[in-house]
């Protein structure tokens, strides 16, 4: 597995993964906008030129808002997401980010377990944060 910064050329594969995993997927333009901001970190993990997953962080005043963590379905449960998140946090550390936040569906037990294992803790609930289906989000922080 190889970790590197996301490039425009990756967006076809990234958007294909996004479409299969999320009910409100980001568009190609959403990713282009995120990639255009120097303070953001968008990484991919690949194997033999195939994108297995990606992670995005918006850097704001020393904190990172994790916007995307996604791993192709056939690679989930194999440690790819944990490795990608670890690499992303290291990259954030090198950019002087000292705290991270994210939202996760209350029903996404696999993601909750991963985030807790990585040192995130629950800090509250965002009522009806998600739709399709409508669901609360758990706000998580890592400092």
Image (cartoon, rainbow, N blue to C red):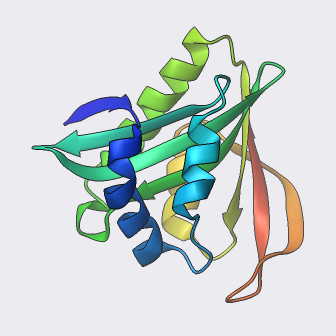
Residue drawn 77% across and 67% down? 137
Residue 38 appears at what percent x and percent y?
Answer: 64, 23
**Residue 63 in picture, x, y percent from top left:** 77, 26
38 shown above or below 134: above
Q: Is residue 106 visible?
A: yes
Residue 105 falls left or right of residue 22 = right
Residue found 40% across the figure and 53% down from its top: 11
Percent across and percent down for residue 41 are 56, 30
Q: Is residue 122 left or right of residue 56?
A: right
Q: Is residue 27 above or below residue 133?
A: above
Where is the N terminus found, in terms of image quarters? top left
Residue 51 placement (x, y as % from top left): 26, 50
Q: Quadrant of the C terminus?
A: top right
> Is residue 141 toward the left or the right of residue 2 in the image?
right
Q: Residue at x 9, y 43 (%)?
A: 48
Q: Residue furthest left?
A: 48
Give 104 or 130, whichever is nearer the viewer: 130
């Amino acid at each position: 597995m190889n970790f590197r910064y996301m490039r425009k050329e990756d967006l076809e594969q990234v958007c294909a993964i996004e479409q299969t995993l999320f009910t409100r997927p980001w568009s190609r333009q959403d990713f282009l906008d995120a990639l255009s901001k120097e303070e953001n970190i968008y990484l991919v993990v690949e194997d033999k030129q195939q994108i297995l997953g990606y992670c995005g962080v918006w850097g704001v005043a020393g904190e990172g808002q994790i916007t995307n963590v996604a791993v192709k379905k056939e690679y989930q449960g194999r440690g790819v997401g944990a490795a990608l998140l670890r690499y992303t946090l290291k990259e954030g550390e090198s950019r002087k980010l000292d705290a991270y936040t994210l939202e996760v569906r209350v029903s996404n037990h696999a993601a909750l377990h991963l985030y807790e294992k990585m040192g995130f803790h629950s800090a509250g609930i965002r009522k009806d944060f998600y739709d399709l289906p409508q669901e609360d989000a758990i706000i998580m922080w890592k400092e």
